[in-house]
Every structure is written in C-alpha cells, then in structure tokens.
Amino acid sequence: MEPENNDMVVYEGGEHKKQPRGLMEDYSDEFSTEQIFETREALLEWVKGVGRRHGMVINTFVSNPGLKGRRRPYVILVCERAGEYRGKKKAGEDDQGEGKRRTGSKKCNCTFRLKGTKQGKDADNVGWDLKVQCGTHTHTDFENLHGHSYAGRLTKEEMVLVEGMSKAMAKPKAILKSLKIRDETNVTGMRTIYNYRQKLQLKERLGRTQMQELFARLSKDKCTFYHRVNNNKEVIDMVWTHPSCVKLARSYPYVFIMDCTYKTNRYKLPLLEIVGFTCTHKTFSIAFAYLEYEKTENYVWALQSLEKILGNCPPPNCIVTDRELGLMKAIGDVYPTSHHLLCRWHVNKNIYSTCKAMFSSEKLWNQFNRDWTTLIEVESEEIFNRDWEKMQRTFVDYPDAIAYLTKSWLDPYKERLVSAWTKKYQHFGTYTSNRAEGAHSRLKSDMGNCLGTFVQVYEHINSSIMTQHDHIRASFEKSKNTYLHCFKKPIYSELRGAVSQCALDHLKIELDKAQKLLPNSDMLCECAIRATHDLPCYHELREFVKKKSHVPLELVGSIWKHMSMEPVIGQGELPNDDELMKGWHKRFASADVDEKNEMLNKFSEIIYPQRTSTMEPSEKATTRGRPGKKLKVVDKSTRRNPSRHEYPPSTHDSCSAKLEGVTWICPKISRPMKVDLMPSQESAKPILLRKLPGRKVNGKALFLDQIHPMFQTYVKSIKNVDSDGHCGFRAVASMMGFGEKNWDRRVLDVLTRYGSYHWMSLPDMESRITMFRKLVGQEVALQETFIDLTYASEDEMVKDFP
C-alpha cells in the first residue's frame, strides 16, 4: 500500500510505521560552519537567519558572560518548542471559565540544540565559533512563522520606527503596513504593535495617574488650563487652551463660534469647542472645555475661564451658536456687549423636522422652504415685512406652519437670524456654526473611537492644532507672496501682498459691480459689506474705477491686513511679583493648620502639576433597567446620534420650539394629530422611533412601540402633554375632560381633599387597583381616568367624579 502524500514511511526491524513528514529530520548540515563570528550578536543573527530560512524559531536557552575571566563565555540555542510545560495547568483540564482565556503551550521537548563558544576569555579580543549538539527536531516543520511571537519581535530599528509613527498619531494598522513594506519577510503581528505601544505609554507615564499625566503634558506644552472638582476630588469641569491658540484669538477676536460635541471620551462628558477664523478664512481652535452638564452655570464658568485666559483681549463682535438655551444665557452674562447670532443651518433643520409633515405635497413644502430661505436673507426691514406678509397670504391654508415660524423663531430671534438686522454687525459672513462642526468631524476622524482618556484625547487635539497652525502659516505666506493673475491689474497694485487673498476676492466682486453701475445712477448706498466685512462697497469704489486709479489701502479694514499669528494687542502690564508674594506670605502666616495645608496644596499644583491629587471623572454607567446576563456590545463609535430631522416626525422634542394647540397634519393621513410646541429648556433627548417600511405615522403610532405588545390592542388613544415637570397632573386633567391647562385648578383640588400627592406609591397599589376594578362600570372608567386614590373611600371616589 502506498503511503499518503503527507506521511513518510520509516522502516525499523522489518516493520514500518507512519510519522508526519519532517519529523525527526536532521538539520546538522545547515548549521554546521567553520566561520568565526566577531561578536556574540553576529553569531545570533546568523543562526536566526538560517533558522528563518528553514522555518524555525530559535531562542537563547542559557548563556554565560564569562564570569570575569574564570571561564570561556558561551551561549546555548534551542528550538522555541524545547523543554516542557511547567505551569499549574493539568493535562486534560479545561481551563476556560467566565472572563478567562483558554491557554496552551508550544513545549514538546524538542531536542534541537546549538552551542556558541568564545575562543578565549571574556576580555580577549577573539571570535566565536558554533557547534551543533543535536540537529534533530521532534516535531514537524513550520509552514510559515506568522503567529510565532518570538519570530515577530521588533528589532531596534523597527522599535524606533514604531515609536516615531506613534508620536505622529499613526494608527497601528498603518504602522504594521509600514513595517511590511520595509521588510517583506517581516512576520510581526498586530498584537506586537499594540503591546509595544502600551509599553511606550507606561514608560512615558512613569506611574502617574491620568490627571497627573494630563497636567504634566499641558504644563510641558505651556497650555493654560482651569478645572473644578467635586467632593471626591474628581474633575467635573475643565477648560484648556494652547498658547498659539491664545495668540490667534488675540489676533482675530472678531467672531467666536461655539458648539458642543459628544462621544469623544470614556467619561461621556460633552466637549465644548470654541473656534475662530483668520483673514485667510482658515479655522483655528481657541479653547476646549469638558463640562459635567450642559447648564447655564457650567457654561458661565467655562466662558469666564476663557475670559481670564485671553486677558485684555476685547470681547468678540459676534458669537455664533445653535439654540442651546443654557449657552445663550451664559453668553449674555459673560459677553453682554457681543452680538449673538443663531446658526441658520440648525434653524432650518428644526423647521424641516417640524413643518415638513404639515404639507400634503413635496411641491408645496419646497415652495415654503424657498420662501423662508429668501425671507431670512433680505437686507431691508421693509422688504422683510412685505415678504413675510406675502408668505403668510400664500400659505394661509397652513396656519400651524406659519404659527411655528412666528412664535418659535421670528418673534423671539429675528434680530439674531434675519439679515435685515444682522447686517448691522461685523460677522464677516458667518451665518452658521459649520466651522465648529467641521472641527468636531476632523477631531473624531483622528480619534477613531469614543473610549479615549483625557490624555489620549489631548494627544489628538494637540496634533489637530499643530496641523491647523501649519495651514494658517502657509495661507499667510501665500497671500503675501503669491499674486493671482486676476489681481495683476493697476487697480490692485497697492493691495497685492498687503491684504489677504480673501479680501481681494470680495473686492473683485464689488469692483465688477462698480463697473456695471450707470454713470448717472442714484448714489444712495444701502450696502452692508462695510458693516459686516469692513470692506468698501461698489459705491465707494466707483470713483477709482472711473479714474482708473488704484484702490488705497486705507479703505480695507485692519483684519484683512494682519497676516500673522502674533497679536497686535499686547498682554498688558504684568502684576508686581513682590507684592503678590508678600501678600501670600502674610496670609500664610496668619492661617491655621488646615488653611496652610490647603494653600500649600494649591501652590503645589501650580508648581508641580504632575503631583496633583485630582482624580479623573468616574465613567458614567447606564443605571436604567435590570443588568442583563449577556455582555452588552460597547459602543465605540464617535459618530453622533442622529438628529431629530433624521427620524420620523416626533411630537415631543426639547430641542425644537413648541406651540400650544397646534394641529399637525401628516401626508396621506386623514386624521390630524396633536402636537405641543411650546419652547422648553429641558435637555432630554427626543423619543426615537423605529423606521418601518411602508408604515403610516400618526399620533397613536408615534408612541405605540414604547408599549408592551400584549397591551397595545387595548390602547384607544395616546395624549402627549407638555413636559414642564407637571406632565402627570396634565395627563390626569386632560383625560378627565378639564383640559391640561386647568391641571392646577381641578386636579389639585381633588388631591388636596384627600391629602395625597403620591403617584402610584407601592404600599397602596393593591388597594387602588381593587377599588378601580369595582368602578369599571362607572363613568370614570369610560373617561380613562387614572389618579392617585390613596386615602379615598369607594363612595368618595364615585361622588367626586361626574
């Protein structure tokens, strides 16, 4: 019988037995050499190279340095499968348990053995020779060396490369790919890259905590930062900024754009990013703030800290945000002289999510949307009033949509939204917070996941800041030294290289208008570019076009001439150090022991930030519901949760304004659904619904999925009341027929009579359920009334309800 292809036949004493191919194969000839190696390292490199060519992994088993001349140095090399397992695991025992990995061993008592010996004592300048003690392996050859950790170890050159690329924020897979390109025979695995990066981080941290490491890096980069802690010394709010960012903010303190982003850190803290832009329209970051809550008090603290950091820098002309009520109030408190503008993009998306479902056809909605967009862009109050009246007449059949625009946006916010009013402010064409949104996107793209610590997030932010500043410097040099061909005209001769190319682009548009202006046309100027951009309009430029002379540099605002990261505004006078230190010593001498310790701790945190006792925030855990037995999938994505306009229309959203008593008609739905649209400062997220194909969305179906399937067939209707903290009373009043507005008059009268303000308290649950069952035939049951019946008798209950 012929042997199989993968087996070899060994005949011993007339008998044959099958053994795997390569088993007991002798490699003595491959490692036998008369070569004398100059050093021990050269011998090891040669042996490992031969072993790699034959699919072997050879390790150092034992070595002796020579013991100061008492014996000859030597090294013994063996196969990585030499020896036997000497751990605690027993053969046949399954070590897999909950939270544990299954383990194994490569050891199989392989007999392969080499010995390298120095030809003299350890101090002698002589070479090394190699002898084969046993050239036989007791196992099959390796087909390849992938997965063998020892063969995939990094060399010194590769370690330097990995360290450099890690500092450059390269991802592990990019680092591994670079190693493979450099050496096609490289068998390093991804786990090796992860382990070495972890080793570098531990080496750099030197046993410091996360906050100590963060403060040490901030101090090393000369960043200015403030933080607050709770009673457990855990950070709750923190603001920091880079010194170059402070210089840019002082150079261009004209428009600040503020916006919060989420899913950037493992602590689930919102990240407030404040950005500005240069005369070359390049976005730069000003400051970053981690906030415990998105409340006015947190925003006020963050903005006051920013005000301290910027010093004598004047307040910004304009601040652009979305309609975050807490942030808007904080801006009014900290920067009362700055003009606040609302982001038009966010406003339009709120209108889309609220009003689109009110229109029965796509054509009518598109016309409504176009008219609204045109309305907020008009630059005259008279034209605005005329167009608004026309829009009201056009959509007279849609009073709910008109009411929403009026009460939610135009009445309270038209001065922050419509160009007829915003043209009075120097905002340089900034109508949205897209610059901040773009900065969020770039940061999250670099981060890759939302499980990073403060230190890891800082590394990505710092890298992003460096990239920003490189682009800004390049744009400055381009504006100074590169002259576009379209600006090589005499009229631009004084401006080329003296103002940014963005300013020249604006001026070119105005000059083209000036050339088309008729000679005898009315010179009444109502242009807004002088107020909004600090640039001359085409009426001012008409004389220069007529005379064919150059435009003087004095007509251009200062922002367009300053092309440098160094601010024109100085830092102001420094305080007298001697007076401060004398005051500190005087206060310290009169303090008691506790006050002295507190003063010393604060002083130590300033001088030695890496010794801070401040702790990182505790990770916020989900406490709702009973913990499941199965492991939950951890959300690592940095992608934001979908906005309201990306879901089917919902009747409850704290981010969109609400009007009392508005009827919302959905397309292809005959029955209207009720929606409450009064403005709210609640920060709760809207209810998110599953999107089912071909499903009609009405008032009942919006919340039906939130109810257990076994009860859905018994639901007659669903009423959504206002979420002002009294929603339970409002629901009771509405179902009793009083109307939710009258909850404070009728419902409280009933509850006060029985002295109870508990809502379904557990001790009396059984008695209330029993009473309700007895009253099923009464009219109260038909009205679907549910109310706290504690301390009420059956007769009293029947008597009080009509």
Image (tube, grey):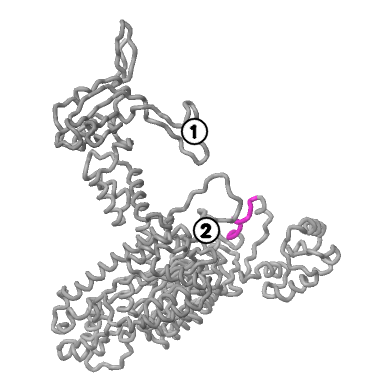
Q: Residue furthest right?
A: 795
- Image position of 37 (left or right of 161): left
Question: From this viewpoint, is residue 565 visible?
Answer: yes
* Front of the two marks 2 and 1: 1
Q: Residue at x 74, y 73 (%)?
A: 748
| Image quadrant in which the N terminus is located | top left
| Circle number at residue 396 | none
Can you give x and y, in whole percent of width and height, for residue 234 in the image? 50, 63
480 within the magenta span: no
Can you give x and y, in whole percent of width and height, for residue 502 in the image? 25, 76
704 within the magenta span: yes
Q: Toward which corner of the image does residue 699 lie, by quadrant? A: bottom right
Residue that label 2 marks: 620
Can you give x and y, in whole percent of width and height, for residue 756 in the image? 76, 68
Question: From this viewpoint, is residue 368 visible?
Answer: no
Give the alpha-carbon distance from disc 2 to disc 1, as whole Å: 33 Å
2 or 1: tag closer to the N-terminus: 1
Residue that label 1 marks: 95
Going by the numbered disc 2, the residue's amino acid type is Lys
Residue range highlighted in magenta = 701-709
Question: Viewer-proximal residue, 496 or 650?
Answer: 496
Going by the numbered disc 1, the residue's amino acid type is Asp
Question: Viewer-proximal residue, 593 or 6?
Answer: 593
| Image quadrant in which the C terminus is located | bottom right
Dot 1: element: loop
Question: Viewer-proximal residue, 48 or 774?
Answer: 48
| Label 2 Cα crowd, 10 Å radius (few <14 / some 14-19 / many 20+) | few
Q: Residue furthest top?
A: 14
Question: Viewer-proximal residue, 729 or 564?
Answer: 564
Can you give x and y, in whole percent of width and height, for residue 277 in the image? 32, 74
